[in-house]
Amino acid sequence: MRAIVTVIGRDQVGIIAAVCALLSEKNVNVLDISQTVLQEYFTMIMLVDTAESTVPFARLKEDLAQAGKERGLDIRVQREDIFDAMHRI
């Protein structure tokens, strides 16, 4: 299953590395990534493949949220089909 990961927060060293390391630990593959810094705010969106994940999707969601909380970031993940449905005009 493909999913969308979003990361928002104040820019700091190591955000991309930390998120990618956590995804790698869970055997989640990054398919595409886009990031930018808007003044002092970091934003990133990633398309990932969770088909081979070693943890259930709900656990991945919790782990990403907790990692974000520890770094002062908002990290969310949602299934691609739900993301698409929510953002369809």
Image (cartoon, rainbow, N blue to C red):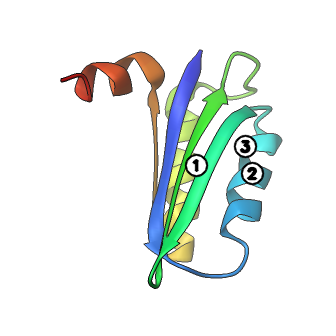
Q: How many marks?
A: 3
Around disc 1, counting alpha carbons within 10 Å, would you say few (fewer than 14), some (14 to 19), or many (20 or more)?
some
The image shows residue 35 at horizontal and vertical percentages of: 58, 58
Check the picture and name the quadrant holding the C terminus: top left
> Sequence order check: which comes first, mark 2 or mark 1?
2
User: Marks 2 and 1, how far apart in space?
Assistant: 13 Å
Identified by mark 2, the residue type is Cys
- Cβ atoms at labels 1 and 3 below 8 Å apart: no
In this figure, which residue is indicated by the disc labeled 1? 63
Check the picture and name the quadrant holding the N terminus: top right
**From what the image shows, is residue 58 above or below residue 41?**
above
> Sequence order check: which comes first, mark 1 or mark 3?
3
Around disc 2, counting alpha carbons within 10 Å, would you say few (fewer than 14), some (14 to 19), or many (20 or more)?
some
**Residue found 49% across the figure and 31% down from its top:** 58
The image shows residue 10 at horizontal and vertical percentages of: 47, 80
User: Marks 2 and 3, how far apart in space?
Assistant: 5 Å
Nearer to me, 85 or 50: 85
Secondary element type, mark 2: helix
In this figure, which residue is indicated by the disc labeled 2? 20
Around disc 3, counting alpha carbons within 10 Å, would you say few (fewer than 14), some (14 to 19), or many (20 or more)?
many
Identified by mark 3, the residue type is Leu
Q: Looking at the image, is mark 2 or mark 1 nearer the viewer?
A: 2
The image shows residue 30 at horizontal and vertical percentages of: 73, 36
**Residue found 70% across the figure and 61% down from its top:** 16
- Cβ atoms at labels 2 and 3 below 8 Å apart: yes
Q: Which mark is residue 23?
A: 3
